[in-house]
Amino acid sequence: MRFQTELVPATLIRRYKRFLADCRLQDGREITAHCANPGSMMGLAEPGMRIWLEPNDDPKKKLKFGWRLVEHGDGHFTGVDTSVPNRALRAALEAREIKGLEAYTTVRPEQKYGENSRIDFLLQGDGLPDAYVEVKSVTLSRAPGLAEFPDSVTARGAKHLGELARVVEAGHRAVMLYLVQRTDCSQFTLAGDIDATYATAYAAARHAGVETLCLGTYITPQGIKVAEPIDIDI
């Protein structure tokens, strides 16, 4: 998935009200960018960080920049836009590039299921059980090389795990897919100290037969692409 317009570097001044970030462009101008991430962004919103913004000239948008990346140095990036994983994964699923899901020929995003929920992707194929794929964006890393989820308490995430378990009980496949939007991590685990309820819900879902996939990403200021699987250590 390529960014629609060329990203520009900036320095983060502050993030506030979850969806707003004051930034300083290289020419010294201070602007406010949209932050498409409702989470805590633990470790990713410190003043002075080098970030990358996507400009736009859409007259319908009040803010003319969107925050897309954090740069960590040594060529590593984190993608902070939570809408990116589904767009990148849809392209990979339709190209049948995801090992374990490549046999499915139909990809249906945002399908209603469970109790007033929508599954990120419903996969279908001749002779195959329907596969319900829930996607979570992973951006937290508190130890070198280790990605963690979640970065804050997520009652909604625990609810989704329960609904995936019920999908399995109904005779379908259910897949919890964690997409690590960081290029500096090679292992994944759950942050049970941040949300013990989510960790418990995950254990119950696994016991019920919910599958887990964890994939990395290639990230540059030009775009984001789904990469190889990442080791799971839970």
Image (cartoon, grey):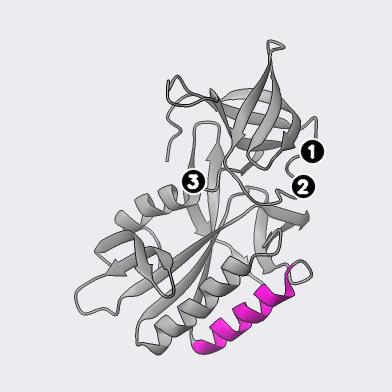
Which residue is identified by label 1? 46
**What amino acid is found at the position of numbered circle 2 in the picture?**
Gly
Q: Quadrant of residue 104?
A: bottom left
Please say if 65 is above or below 84. Answer: above
Where does the image place residue 214, in percent across and percent down from the top left?
55, 64
> Residues under labels 2 and 1: Cα distance?
7 Å
Q: Which residue, given by chain and number where applicable, does mark 3 sit on? A: 84
Q: Which residues are magenta?
A: 195-208
Residue shown at the point (52%, 25%) measured from the top left: 62
Question: Is disc 3 placed on a helix, strand or loop?
Answer: helix
Q: CA distance from mark 1 to mark 3?
A: 22 Å
In the image, 142 versus 204, the foreground residue is 204
In this rendering, does residue 74 appear at all? no
User: Mostly what secondary structure, the magenta segment?
Assistant: helix
Labels 1 & 3 near each other (Cβ < 8 A) = no
Res. 43 mark: 2
Mark 2 touches mark 1? (CB < 8 Å): yes
Amino acid of disc 1: Glu
The label on residue 147 is none
Tell me which corner region of the image, top left, top right, bottom left or bottom right, holds residue 133: bottom left
Question: Between disc 3 and disc 2, whose residue precedes?
Answer: 2
Q: In the shown orientation, is residue 227 left or right of residue 191? A: left
Q: Residue at x 30, y 60 (%)?
A: 108
